[in-house]
Image: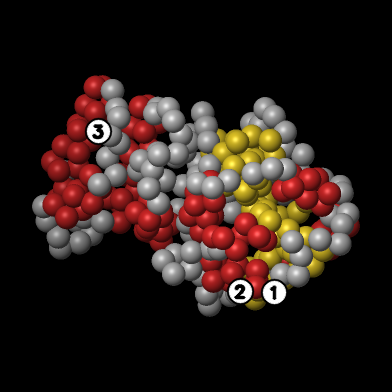
Amino acid sequence: MVSIIISSYLPKYFSALEKNIAETIGVPYEIIKVDNPGLMGICEAYNKGAQKAQFDYLLFIHEDILFKTENWGPQLISHLDKENTGIVGVAGSSYVPSAPSSWTVSEKYNVVNILQGDKNSTESVPIHTTKRNREKVFAVDGVFMAIKKVNYLLFKFNESILKGFHGYDLDLSLRVSKKFQNYVIDDILIEHFSKGNPDKVWLDNNILVKQNIDSGFQQKNDSETEKKAFLGFLYNYFKYYPVNKKSIALTLKFYPKKLNFNDHLAIIKKYFQYIRYHKSINNKTNTNF
């Protein structure tokens, strides 16, 4: 009943997960392993895997996880069968800022139900911020993304513009949320053994996502969240790109339109700081303002 698609490059983790799924899922399933030691982006790998899926329910997961919930398959199918459901996940956010950002917008809007660890530790920390069994979200984290095949076929992963291993989850979940309602659920618990890696590719792909998906998600604007997201974007952008007219013009394309006066002032001051100290910021390049 459930087709589980995994882009795999860590045999140790895949073997453990394969055994774990067999012991916990509780419904007929298939695992579609896409061997991918960095040869293709995750969008391409997931689309290739989904083409082989025999069942009506698709689950895209990282291989460095374990399921802690017994008999989780019927629960997942029940969630996906509810009317107007798009993507079901275990972490996501109910706010989409104007600036390029990952799904982790702010603690105020993030909704998570996960045991979070890392590859260097045997201890995982429970992160549980859900208040209901089904929390409405726009963005869903790619560690666990479930969707009906019929709905997946309307969207698919955006391999035409997104390469590498970042931005795929944000892009798909935001596009799906334009037609359906995405959810973070609290009755399927996984343990995840690694954290994100926000590098230049992560930044570039988040910019591409924002350029290809218009705004207008939530009805109410949050000035404080918009300011923090935009300042975070500037910080990440000028880690990899020089402070010059071209870069400033690009960042301004994502400037939040609805801010209170103090938040406008904070962003303007930050721009002046970047311009004032552009030489020291740009010392890694030959480009000057």
* Left or right, 118 with reference to 207: right
Q: Which mark is residue 52?
A: 1
CA gap, disc 1 and disc 2: 7 Å
CA gap, disc 2 and disc 3: 43 Å
Q: Which mark lies nearer to you, 2 or 3?
A: 2
Residue 211 visible from this viewpoint: yes
Q: Secondary structure at mark 1?
A: loop
Quadrant of the image containing the N terminus: bottom right
Q: Amino acid at mark 2?
A: Lys
In the rendered image, the vertical position of residue 22 relative to residue 93, given as above or below? below
- Which residue carries the number 2 mark? 48
Residue 207 visible from this viewpoint: no
State which tag comes first along the sequence, 3 or 1.
1
What's the residue at 58%, 46% (across, down)?
180
Residue 57 at x, y = what percent?
73, 58
What's the residue at 25%, 47% (across, down)?
253
